[in-house]
């Protein structure tokens, strides 16, 4: 038996842990593991791949990114907007299938987010022996309580807030931090709560500049002299628009700029000196946390188990501390978003965090 693995879409801390898990579990079963380079592109003839043994994955747990490379562009790019996906052209699928057949790949593990998993589903519908592993720092996939990479991104946000807090306090400033997450506010919510933010602005909860400024003024009256504001890149601005850098970057909107706009509005309404920082790809790079390494390895091992059991068209899923699997379709139907009236949001409100609403 030969098992193939590829990473597709944006990179994410913990990808190498998944590779380590798949390769280790495959070797234990006496199988050969093949890693395809740069996502699905590695499947196009003549094929760009490498045989992976446990020795090849020794020491990669601690590495960010992916030793196989990845892409969110190219022939297999499936995302065409918020939750929308396109089909990969049949001619491309047929060419890639030739490589799969020539190499006699008995199972193909696709590690990706909603766009890549939708492609995986398309391939499975055509009879490919595909198994999905969910990957995204945004943590916005249905049918899995957590994806690896999220914890690492949140840790980076928290570390940044810790730093912004000391400089903000010294200068009695409002410090605004824009974080990733695309159309979901999980990174902003978790990062903001753990980092002691007083305002968190999310894509899921509409906000006004006046409410944000009012909250800051109330805090000032209470004796607080500096304030941390976390802005999710996908937070809709009060005019109803997203802050974008590029409306069509390989079929996907490229978000950015919300933090700066919020900072300008806060400074002009409150008169308080305000600075903004855009964290950007720093939160996606670097070493994965211990949690993400373990999650990644467990996901990889489960993917190999699903291959052994012939459970194709399924995606590894994390539920109630257990790693299990669900049909890929359940994961990609729609995004998992933060809900307003939930315990975690209520908890944040209870400790004085404003969502600007
Ligand atoms: O989906 C992961 C993510 O990091 C988002 O949080 C962010 O909006 C996007 O990817 C950035 O993509 P790129 O690396 O293509 O700029």
Image (cartoon, grey):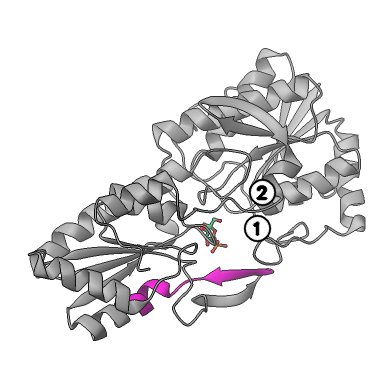
Label 2, residues with CA under 10 Å away: few <14, some 14-19, many ≥20: many
Contact between labelled residues 1 and 2, with CB atoms less than 8 Å apart: yes
The residue that label 1 is drawn on is: 72
The residue that label 2 is drawn on is: 8
Q: Determine the residue positioned at 65% across, 32% down.
A: 316
- Answer yes or no: is residue 351 visible: yes
Location of the C terminus by quadrant is: bottom left
Q: State the residue in front, 51 or 239.
A: 239
Residue labelled 2 has its Cβ within 8 Å of some atom of ligand 1: no
Task: Determine whether 274 is above or below 51 in the image.
Answer: below
Q: Which residues are magenta?
A: 251-262
SS label for mark 1: loop
Residue 211 horizontal/vertical position (percent): 31, 74
Kindly indicate the quadrant of the structure image that contains residue 21.
top right
Q: Which mark is residue 102?
A: none
**Does the magenta run of residues contain 252?**
yes
- Answer yes or no: is residue 286 visible: no
Kindly indicate the quadrant of the structure image that contains residue 210.
bottom left
């Amino acid at each position: 038996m030969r098992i193939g693995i590829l990473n597709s879409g944006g990179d994410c801390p913990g990808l190498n842990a998944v590779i380590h898990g798949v390769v280790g579990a495959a070797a234990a079963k006496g199988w050969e593991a093949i890693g395809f380079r740069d996502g699905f592109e590695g499947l196009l003839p003549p094929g760009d791949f490498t045989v992976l043994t446990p020795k090849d994955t020794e020491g990669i747990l601690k590495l960010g990114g992916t030793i196989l490379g990845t892409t969110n562009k190219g022939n297999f790019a499936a995302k065409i907007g918020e939750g929308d996906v396109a089909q990969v052209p049949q001619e491309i699928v047929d060419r890639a299938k030739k490589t799969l057949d020539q190499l006699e790949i008995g199972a193909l593990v696709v590690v990706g987010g909603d766009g890549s998993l939708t492609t995986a589903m398309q391939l499975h519908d055509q009879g490919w022996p595909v198994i999905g592993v969910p990957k995204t720092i945004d943590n916005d996939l249905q049918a899995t309580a957590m994806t690896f990479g999220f914890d690492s991104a949140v840790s980076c946000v928290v570390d940044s807030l810790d730093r912004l807090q000391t400089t903000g306090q010294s200068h009695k400033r409002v410090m605004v931090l824009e974080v990733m997450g695309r159309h979901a506010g999980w990174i902003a919510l978790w990062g903001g709560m753990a980092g002691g933010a007083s305002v968190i602005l999310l894509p899921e909860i509409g906000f006004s500049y006046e409410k944000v400024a009012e909250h800051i003024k109330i805090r000032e009256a209470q004796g607080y002299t500096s304030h941390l504001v976390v802005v999710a890149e996908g937070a809709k601005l009060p005019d109803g628009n997203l802050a974008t850098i590029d409306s069509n970057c390989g079929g996907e909107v490229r978000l950015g700029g919300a933090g700066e706009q919020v900072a300008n509005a806060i400074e002009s309404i409150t008169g308080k000196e305000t600075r903004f920082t855009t964290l950007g790809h720093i939160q996606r790079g670097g070493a994965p946390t211990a949690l993400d390494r373990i999650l990644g390895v467990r996901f990889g091992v489960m993917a190999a188990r699903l291959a052994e059991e012939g459970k194709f068209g399924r995606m590894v899923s994390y539920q109630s501390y257990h790693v299990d699997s669900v049909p890929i379709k359940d994961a990609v139907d729609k995004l998992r978003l933060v809900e307003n009236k939930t315990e975690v949001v209520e908890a944040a409100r209870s400790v004085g965090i404003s969502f600007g609403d």
